Image: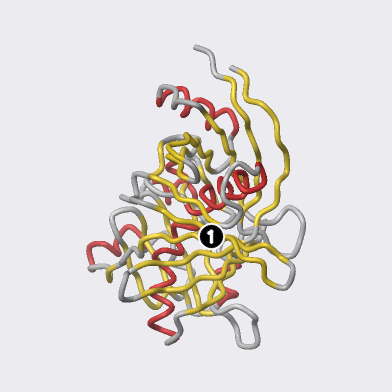
Amino acid sequence: MSLKCPLGLIDAFVSETPFSGNPAGVCLVEEFPETSVMQGVAFEMQWSETAFLKKIAPDYYHIRWFSPEDEAPMCGHATLAASHFLFEKGDVDPDFLRFHSCAGPLAVHKETQSGTAWLFLNFPACPIYPCSDEDKKPLAPLLSSLSASMFYRDALLYVAVLESEDAVARYRPDFEGIKTLPCRALVLTARADKGRTYDFVSRYFAPRVGITEDPVCGSAHCRLTPFWARILHKKNLYARQLSRRDGLLKVTYQPGAERVILGGQARTILRGTLDL
């Protein structure tokens, strides 16, 4: 087996401070290697996600995402990181590119706002549904110390709506307990405190797939954006993820098309060559 390709480490959905956002690896390959090789690279890197890109046509790439433990069905922050990587490399249209993915077609455009580059990802909105009493049972021991007002889920994750931003920030996760949930991840969310410059907050835990706490999760906001848009009666919102690293997103819900626009900034941390 031989693999030599450009590699980047990009912080995606960064806030105002250094070392914020979610680190993602980006590998640009001529052809995808065996899935086991890509999984091995992701495990070696130990970033929450590593994206592999293969060019299909000008400004059009096939993208696949891998956590340290498995291939992900969708990943927002690694897509934003991959877009930043390609825009910086300069081999694509300076303002627009597209991806083919297992989650369907994805589009990215770049805007400069007040002298700062923002990337906007067009992703499918993902509905979440109220939990049945049976669905709530596995959550009870994990959230017994919190006042959770509502519980939702889909096939991949649970969402618990807490009473305050502070409750989300103070939560101490039981990672072994979260691993036993019959889904990929647990998300906590709450309305932002009054006077904040953002509308809602969240945290994301996925120890089953090697991600104890995801610093900033784009795909979770494909669920949270429609939810909070309906609650707050706003289509355009700001979101903050209260991980140790911190992260900021501009999000928009498009109810007719059932799409979510995920906006964020990115920073390149390193560039190099993957040589296997």
- Identified at 47% across, 28% down, the residue is 38
User: Residue sitting at 32 percent across and 70 percent down?
Assistant: 257
The one nearer the camera, 178 or 82, is 82
The kind of residue on which mark 1 rests is His
Q: Which residue is mark 1?
A: 109
143 or 59: which is nearer to us? 59
* Residue 180 x %, y %: 36, 47
Model colouring: secondary structure
> x, y percentage for residue 214?
54, 52
Q: Tag 1: Cα neighbours inside 10 Å, few (<14), some, or many (≥20)?
A: some
Extreme residue in the top direction? 1
Classify mark 1: helix, strand or loop. strand
Front residue (pair 139, 248): 248
Question: Image height check: is 204 above or below 48?
Answer: below
- Give the side of residue 258 with respect to residue 99, left or right: left
Q: On the rendered image, what quadrant is the C terminus found in?
A: top right
Q: Is residue 197 left or right of residue 37?
A: right
Q: Where does residue 245 sit, x and y in percent of width and height?
A: 67, 56
At 49% across and 54% down in the image, what residue appears?
76
Q: Residue furthest right?
A: 18
Query: How many marks are shown on the rendered structure?
Result: 1
Residue 123 horizontal/vertical position (percent): 41, 60
Residue toward you, 258 or 172: 258
Q: Residue shown at 58%/57% (left/top)?
A: 95
Q: Is residue 59 above or below residue 52?
A: below
Along the horizontal axis of the image, is 143 left or right of 258?
A: right
